[in-house]
Amino acid sequence: MQKLDPKAVWLIFTGFILRWFIFILVFGIYIAFMLLADSDKDTPAFGFLKWLWVVVPALLVFFWIWAKLTYHFYRYELREDGFRKEFGVIWKKYVTIPYDRIQNVDIYRGVIARILGLSDLNIQTAGASAQVSRYGTWGLGAEGRLPGLSREVAEQIRDELVKRSRQSRTTNQGL
């Protein structure tokens, strides 16, 4: 089984931060207004801000550990029967995509991925690609998405998947 590029930890980490930033910002503003509305003149309304010096570093450490664990448990391989990946820290998910179901293989490079020199490989399958967007439903990811590959590895896997997909289709049509 192959692993993602080691720099993928940074990609996963920044993804966690960006996903949670809006939630934390909205929640923080809500708490600030609640404290401001309930505060007396003697107590500072934004006294809770001193806790940010504890909460923010704790969240960053948690996100970093979770990113390392996510990276550690993310594996993939090209088998004879199809592309297989497994991922998940607490709940494991095992996905196998037969080569004859592969319709298209794309390489996507977002801003953060480009900075890190990484690419995402997106495998579009018959049926599933019409139901799931590029990033999946609620950010869970499509069944054939491999985030955090080096550009060279992503291109090699793309070429190999396209080759095996064509071979599988020609073999199945000949039967």
Image: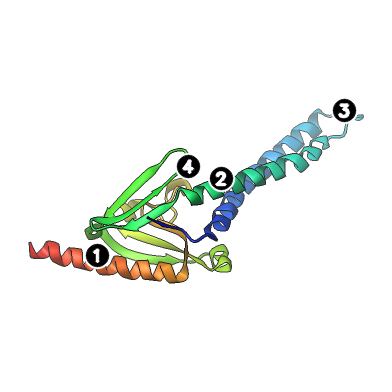
| Residue nearest the viewer, comparing 94 with 166 | 94
For marks 1 and 4, the one nearer the N-term is 4
Judged left or right of residue 169, residue 24 is: right
Q: What amino acid type should be assigned to the residue bearing mark 3?
A: Asp
Q: Compute the Cα span from label 1 to label 4.
A: 30 Å
Q: Compute the Cα span from label 4 to label 3.
A: 45 Å
**Residue 169 x, y percent position in the rendering:** 18, 64
Label 2 environment density (alpha carbons within 10 Å; few <14, some 14–19, many ≥20): some
Query: Residue 89 has which mark?
Result: 4
Label 3 environment density (alpha carbons within 10 Å; few <14, some 14–19, many ≥20): few
Image quarter of the N terminus:
bottom left
Q: Compute the Cα span from label 1 to label 3.
A: 69 Å
Q: Compute the Cα span from label 2 to label 4.
A: 8 Å
For marks 1 and 2, the one nearer the N-term is 2
Query: Residue 40 has which mark?
Result: 3
SS at badge 4: loop
Q: What amino acid type should be assigned to the residue bearing mark 2?
A: Trp
SS at badge 1: helix
**Residue carrying label 2:** 66
Q: Is residue 161 above or below residue 46?
A: below
Q: Compute the Cα span from label 3 to label 2.
A: 40 Å
Label 1 environment density (alpha carbons within 10 Å; few <14, some 14–19, many ≥20): many
